[in-house]
Amino acid sequence: MSDQQLQLGVDDALIALQRAWEHALEVLAGQINKPSFESWIRTAKPVSLDGDLVRIVTNSRFAKHWLESKHLPLIKEILETHLQRSLRVRVDLTEGDHDEPALMADKLPAKPKSRPKPDDEPISLPLNSQYNFDNFVVGPTNRLAHACAMAIAERPGKTYNPLFLYGGAGLGKTHLMHAIGHVVSQTMPDVRVAYVSGEAFTYHYITSLREHRTAEFRRQYRSIDLWLVDDIHFLIGKERTEEEFFHTYNAIHDMGKQIVLTSDRAPKDLELDARLLSRFQAGMLADISPPDLETRMAILQSKAQCENMTLSDDVILYIAKLIRSNIRQLEGALITLHAYASLMKTSVTLSLAEEVLSKHFGESAPPVVDAQKVLQEVSRKFNVELTDLKGKCRTKDIVGPRQVAMYLMRELTDYSLPAIGKAIGGKDHTTVLHSCKRIEQKIASDKGFASQIGELSRRIAGGQG
Ligand code: ADP
Ligand code: MG
């Protein structure tokens, strides 16, 4: 074999490995929480395929440990399936500086002289450079959280302390938290920012216990000025770590330093020490709920623009209606669609979107709600006759429910604006749009109304299955 052929063979193998790795990333991204994924998996790279040995490198001892102890079997399986052969997979550290926290430092081989003292090493996980205020789309369901995050980014420690952000998966909690971190690091370089997930805190603490380095652990945490703690619910059921967290929390808070926390549920629903919960509750609580249709469309538009994708309005509407409760999945849909279109060298049309996405996102397919169902439920809820809902009467107690009906049709059915107008007794599409906006404004400004509409919407959608 000539050198050139040999080189080609090696290149091909590497390309195949790279492809298989990308596939593994996709699978892992769906299984691992985002901060951990971004910090420990995204940063790892496959570097060689030598015989049956795949070498993956990472620059962090923590990532190496984490990959080896938790994810290697799955990674191996995916790579094997993809490359259609049996493999051994090894995780190595890259040469030079590692970014591991000091807690693991004494496991390191001899360090070069220039290495910082363990105390100076960062405990923070890296911030994702993509998570900024600029590209965060604000809508009625995340407006409060966004406003609080902005206020803190401008004046950490001076407004709400702590800020507790909570809500379901994929709704932007981590995004806002990183955005705060970026602004503060850029505008106040002296402020020591530490972004730590509940999982990383647990790991740091346990390692420090095992290695008899708790004093150092405490010293490090107590030097933080802005503490961003993501996914605090991870501490549930880990009593000793929770106790340590409690003391760390008090120490940082008592020094007047800013703390921001996120969780997948409200403090009252967290099974943590009551003393800790009362401290969370004493701060500012802001929940993020799933975005409404308009916001989902705006997010898709903004993401598509970033990816240089042109999407027609009907495709955007289709995706926004298909995926309703998780922005990460919205992004996933867009990326999948983008990949298919470029693979098949075609443009993204509605029929391509339907074909590709219904398959991948089938479970979260919207219930098939028809307009009649919406009208019936609205009529029952507000005690208004169907004929009045569809009629021309403009008294307040009928116009309100009529607007709600239009809003819910837009949210829950696949009717276009003109079709909704027709279903409500022959209104034109600008009336429908105006009605939807009115209801959105009211939802944003009136919590009681928002929950009433949420409940009604769930009843209509849930009643289908
Ligand atoms: P969470 O921490 O609540 O699970 P993330 O912050 O990880 O969710 O968000 C999931 C994905 O959705 C991220 O890629 C994030 O950039 C994106 N995202 C969430 N909310 C918004 C928003 N309002 N505007 C733009 N992108 C968003
Ligand atoms: Mg998160």
Image (cartoon, rainbow, N blue to C red):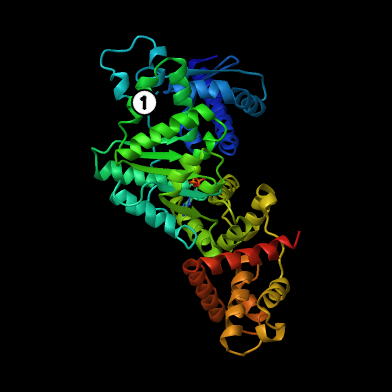
Crowding near the residue tagged with mark 1, few <14, some 14–19, many ≥20 C-alpha atoms within 10 Å: some
Q: Can residue 125 be seen from the camera position used here?
A: no
Task: Say if 104 sits above or below 234 in the image.
Answer: above
According to the image, label 1 marks what residue? 218
Residue 404 drawn at (x, y percent): 60, 74
Q: Residue furthest right?
A: 465
Q: Nearer the viewer, residue 384 or 182?
A: 384
Q: Nearer the viewer, residue 377 or 421?
A: 377
The picture quadrant where one finds residue 259 is top left
Task: Say if 376 sits above or below 156 in the image.
Answer: below
Badge 1 residue CB within 8 Å of ligand 2: no
Residue at left 64%, top 51%?
Answer: 357
Image quadrant in which the N terminus is located:
top right
Task: Say if 95 sits above or below 440 in the image.
Answer: above
Residue 13 drawn at (x, y percent): 56, 23
Residue at left 34%, top 36%?
Answer: 252
Residue at left 49%, top 16%?
Answer: 3
Q: Nearer the viewer, residue 375 or 356?
A: 375
Image quadrant in which the C terminus is located:
bottom right
Residue at left 46%, top 68%?
Answer: 445
Q: Can residue 436 be seen from the camera position used here?
A: yes
Horizontal side, residue 379 vs residue 449: left or right: right
Residue 350 drawn at (x, y percent): 62, 60
Q: Nearer the viewer, residue 450 or 254?
A: 254
Tag 1's secondary structure?
helix
Horizontal side, residue 339 vs residue 106: left or right: right
Task: Say if 218 sits above or below 271 in the image.
Answer: above
Three-letter amino acid code of the residue under disc 1: Arg
Q: Residue furthest top?
A: 110
Residue 233 drawn at (x, y percent): 53, 39
